[in-house]
């Protein structure tokens, strides 16, 4: 049995992914990119016992912003933006004892690194059975996500689309809107403008803003990144970035110009991109859920494209209880709240609650 902590340059990272279905969010270049954005350290934990593989990429984050008076540095770990989480081979997931054993070893390794807590966002498709295999580490449900089943024929995909969306798509076509994929590198400026305008309009919180370095970094992912756009008379009116890996296409980030909101061209974009993704032999177009997993207006919009749903889980673990409680007390004192108030916030880790 081998247990290894990998940096993004370790050859075992990519070699392991070659053995497992995975998403772009698991790639070392993507994890490294999000680490630069968040000022964290990109790593992955690997436990392999013959054909049983447990793999988890993460970002190692300093807790010095909470308290810097410890004798040694204290950290926590989080997932990169998106849906990365844990990957396991079939042999690992089907062994009743292996998942809990592997996560226990993961925790021991983290503890030796000075980590006090772990917060992992699990993949709604690749990890959809994990709630049944992690018996000692119950997962937290964070709402549902929507995907389109691309194994259906086009007529059935259309039939499973909400009537209102069908009407909007047809109206956009009559008005002269057209959807297509274009080179992200050539249209990066247009995309950034539309995305930032959209985030400003919806008053998005900071985690949904990304600097230019992030978007330029995505170009290094090459053919796994695609830009879908809708045009009207030569003007791009909406755009969305899509990731493609192992039969899964992810709608990553997107937006619409304010002046075209009334026509709802994003409906046409998602319709065209699901046909594009199907033509390329993919099985899923995953379009995600609501903000923070809520069944909000965004979720309602997405749910009109398909009846297929997935549970979105997070795994939350206190790795070092003593350090966790110390940070919790530091935080409570700093913001003039009680430890109990922070614990009742439902935010994890509680020492980062406000």
Image: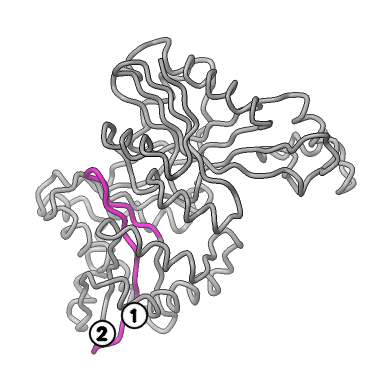
Per the image, is 251 magenta? yes
Residue at 50% x, 34% y: name it: 141
Image mark for residue 128: none
19 horizontally vs 116: left or right: left
In the image, residue 212 above or below residue 176: above
**Label 1 SS:** strand
Q: Quadrant of residue 67?
A: top right
Whole-percent x, y for residue 44 in the image: 47, 36
Whole-percent x, y for residue 343 in the image: 75, 34
Residue at 42% x, 52% y: name it: 30
Whole-percent x, y for residue 223 in the image: 24, 59
Please provide the residue range marked out in magenta. 233-252
Question: Which residue extends farthest top?
Answer: 97
Image mark for residue 237: 1
78 horizontally vs 63: left or right: left
172 horizontally vs 84: left or right: left
Q: Which residue is at the front of the view, 93 or 237?
A: 93
Give whichever of discs 2 and 1 has the lower sequence position: 2
Q: How many labels does the image show?
A: 2
For the rendered model, the colour scheme is: one colour
Q: Which residue is at the front of the view, 24 or 7?
A: 7
Residue named by callout 2? 232
Per the image, is 62 magenta? no
Residue at 42% x, 76% y: name it: 194
Could you tell me if the residues under marks 2 and 1 are in contact, i.e. CB atoms within 8 Å? yes
Q: Count residues near mark 2 (Cα–Cα under 10 Å), then give few for <14, some for 14-19, many for 20+.
A: some
In the image, residue 162 above or below residue 219: above
């Amino acid at each position: 049995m081998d247990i290894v902590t990998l940096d993004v340059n370790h050859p075992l990272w990519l070699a392991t992914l070659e053995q497992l279905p995975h998403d772009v969010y698991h790639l070392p270049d993507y994890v490294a990119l999000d680490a630069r954005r968040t000022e964290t350290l990109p790593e992955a934990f690997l436990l392999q016992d013959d054909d049983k593989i447990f793999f988890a990429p993460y970002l190692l984050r300093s807790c010095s912003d909470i308290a810097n008076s410890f004798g040694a540095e204290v950290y926590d770990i989080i997932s990169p933006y998106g849906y990365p989480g844990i990957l396991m081979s079939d042999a690992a997931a089907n062994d009743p004892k292996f998942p809990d054993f592997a996560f226990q070893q993961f925790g021991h390794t983290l503890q030796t690194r000075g980590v006090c807590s772990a917060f992992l966002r699990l993949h709604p498709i690749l990890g959809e059975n994990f709630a049944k295999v992690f018996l000692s580490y119950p997962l937290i449900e964070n709402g549902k996500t929507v995907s389109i089943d691309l194994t259906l024929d086009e007529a059935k995909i259309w039939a499973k689309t909400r009537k209102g969306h069908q009407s909007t798509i047809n109206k956009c076509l009559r008005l002269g809107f057209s959807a297509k994929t274009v080179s992200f590198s050539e249209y990066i400026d247009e995309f950034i403008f539309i995305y930032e305008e959209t985030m400003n309009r919806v008053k998005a919180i900071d985690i949904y803003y990304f600097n230019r370095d992030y978007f330029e970094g995505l170009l290094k992912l090459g053919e796994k990144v695609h830009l879908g756009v809708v045009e009207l008379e030569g003007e791009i009116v909406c755009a969305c970035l899509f990731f493609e890996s192992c039969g899964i296409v992810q709608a990553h980030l997107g937006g619409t110009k304010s002046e075209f909101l009334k026509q709802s061209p994003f409906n046409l974009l998602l319709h065209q991109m699901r046909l594009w993704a199907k033509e390329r032999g993919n099985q899923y177009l995953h379009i995600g859920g609501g903000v923070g997993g809520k069944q909000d207006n965004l979720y309602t919009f997405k749910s009109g494209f398909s009846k297929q749903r997935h549970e979105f889980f997070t795994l939350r673990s206190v790795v070092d209880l003593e350090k966790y409680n110390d940070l919790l007390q530091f935080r409570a004192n700093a913001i003039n709240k009680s430890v109990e108030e922070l614990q009742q916030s439902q935010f994890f880790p509680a020492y980062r609650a406000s």
